[in-house]
């Protein structure tokens, strides 16, 4: 009787069902166990919007001391910071995340100077810094302030028509100043006309597009600064002669750079790349998508940068300097030497065909142990102004340059990106075809298919 029961069809089906249920239960339990033990996620967005940047990853992994990030918020709102903080915890076993409710532990909140809910405090060793915001930029900036013990100051030269750090208009560089502040750089303006010496507290010097000639005393002060181990960035526009907007050739300054192995050409780059035109860029904006191997641009592959009204340059090493190309214009670029005409003649036989070098970086051997001068030269200044710094990778290039000049190579990388604006650019004819297909073509296909089915069934 028992054997017949075991062989019955209903018994076998019951056993099969029980086995299947057991397998499913075990699989769910194992999956939940692995999910709790190994927290892993994938970011499939185009610009990795929901992943930490290489800057943050590189910085966190380089810290040898324990890192504690304390998130202060109401207990019911801890989840607001959980996803972002979990990304930091995944980077290194040295990172510890704490969640504190200021209402339940007011003493700790008071000790850390917490003034509002939703604040993160980053601690490395005995040093604590509050994040400026609950974003990657804010938390990574606090980490940078923790590990950088000395003050780093970027000095912008003023007095000869340069872009101003306090100018919020399109031609100002106030946004660059703000981005430098997020990486714990202080900024100040210096005037070499009244004091012919670069202040000793300048970590890096920036010459941002002077429109007037520098005096010989100013150039001598800059040369002395770099050749004694200082760091400087030169953004020099082509000497355009267009009505009241003339730009001086700055012979003394370009002569100094020539002595270091950078010869600036008196020309204007014209870029006929159709991709640039689709992006809304004119021929006077050089579009760059290919970079050299110098540390400033190593991590910029796949990122576009744009340079309005740029000039080219020639580079070579000298007895004391080593110069490297950062990037060059594309194959579709031209260089015109007609700098006094407001019209662009791409068919002028005098135009020089690209590619041509647009930026370079070099080192100066001072002969002193542990002392090396560094300089970056870009044949354009508008790319770093408020009106253009947010174009694709321009901000990354500017910050990478300052990081390299400051010997902070560990900070050189791509910064957090805003959500990608993925638009489809179509001509009027293409838009007409899309409208015809969507409004008439597809409905007609559905009607015809339905008619065929009805006819067959009939």
Image (cartoon, rainbow, N blue to C red):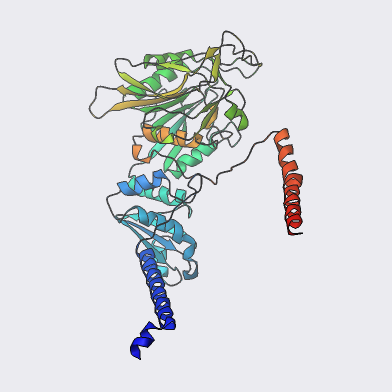
Residue 223's place in the image compared with 164, above or below, is above
Q: Nearer the viewer, residue 406 or 4?
A: 4
Q: Residue furthest top?
A: 349
Locate residue 34, reporting x and y percent. Answer: 36, 64
Q: Nearer the viewer, residue 273 or 434?
A: 434
Q: Quadrant of the N terminus?
A: bottom left
Q: Nearer the viewer, residue 386 or 165?
A: 386
**Residue 206, quarter of picture:** top left
Q: Nearer the viewer, residue 437 or 210?
A: 437
Residue 24's place in the image compared with 343, above or below, is below
Query: Residue at 30% across / 56% down in the picture?
Result: 93
Residue 448 visible in the displayed image: yes
Query: Residue at 39% across / 66% down in the picture?
Result: 31
Query: Residue at 37% across / 61% down in the picture?
Result: 97
Locate residue 154, reporting x and y percent. Answer: 43, 34
On the rendered structure, is 244 left or right of 175? Answer: right
Query: Residue at 55% across / 47% down in the picture?
Result: 419
Locate residue 317, reporting x and y percent. Answer: 33, 16
**Residue 382, quarter of picture:** top right
Q: Quadrant of the C terminus?
A: bottom right
């Amino acid at each position: 009787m028992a054997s017949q029961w075991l062989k019955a069809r209903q018994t076998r089906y019951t056993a099969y069902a029980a086995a299947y249920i057991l397998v499913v239960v075990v699989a769910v339990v194992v999956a939940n166990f692995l999910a709790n033990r190994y927290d892993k996620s994938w970011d499939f967005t185009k610009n990795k919007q929901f992943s930490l940047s290489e800057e943050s990853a590189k910085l966190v992994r380089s810290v040898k001391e324990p890192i504690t990030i304390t998130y202060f918020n109401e207990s019911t709102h801890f989840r607001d910071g959980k996803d972002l903080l979990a990304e930091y915890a995944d980077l290194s076993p040295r990172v510890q995340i704490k969640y504190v409710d200021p209402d339940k532990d007011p003493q700790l909140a008071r000790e850390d100077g917490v003034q509002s809910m939703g604040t993160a405090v980053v601690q490395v060793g005995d040093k604590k810094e509050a994040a400026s915001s609950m974003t990657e930029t804010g938390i990574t900036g606090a980490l940078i302030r923790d590990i950088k013990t000395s003050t780093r100051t970027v000095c912008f030269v003023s007095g000869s028509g340069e872009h101003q750090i306090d100018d919020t208009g399109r031609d100002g560089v106030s946004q660059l100043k703000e981005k430098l502040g997020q990486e714990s750089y202080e900024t100040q303006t210096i005037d070499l006309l009244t004091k012919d010496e670069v202040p000793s507290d300048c970590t890096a010097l920036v010459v941002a597009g002077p429109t007037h000639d520098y005096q010989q005393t100013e150039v001598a002060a800059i040369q002395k600064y770099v050749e004694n181990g200082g760091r400087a960035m030169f953004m020099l526009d082509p000497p355009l002669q267009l009505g009241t907007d003339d730009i001086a050739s700055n012979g003394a300054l370009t002569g100094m750079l020539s002595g270091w192995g950078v010869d600036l050409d008196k020309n204007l780059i014209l870029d006929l790349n159709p991709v640039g035109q689709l992006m809304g860029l004119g021929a006077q904006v050089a579009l760059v998508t290919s970079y050299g191997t110098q540390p400033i641009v190593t991590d910029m592959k796949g990122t576009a940068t744009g340079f309005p009204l740029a000039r080219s340059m020639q580079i070579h090493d000298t007895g004391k300097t080593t110069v490297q190309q950062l990037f060059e214009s594309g194959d579709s670029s031209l260089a015109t030497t007609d700098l006094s005409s407001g019209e662009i003649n791409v068919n002028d036989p005098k135009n020089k065909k690209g590619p041509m070098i647009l930026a370079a970086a070099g080192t100066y051997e001072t002969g002193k142990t542990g002392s090396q001068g560094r300089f970056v030269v870009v044949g354009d200044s508008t790319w770093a102004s408020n009106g253009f710094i947010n174009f694709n990778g321009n901000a990354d290039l500017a910050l990478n340059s300052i990081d390299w000049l400051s010997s902070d190579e560990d900070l050189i990388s791509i910064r957090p990106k805003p959500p990608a604006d993925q638009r489809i650019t179509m001509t009027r004819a293409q838009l007409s075809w899309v409208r015809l297909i969507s409004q008439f073509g597809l409905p007609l296909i559905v009607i015809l298919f339905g008619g065929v089915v009805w006819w067959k069934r009939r």
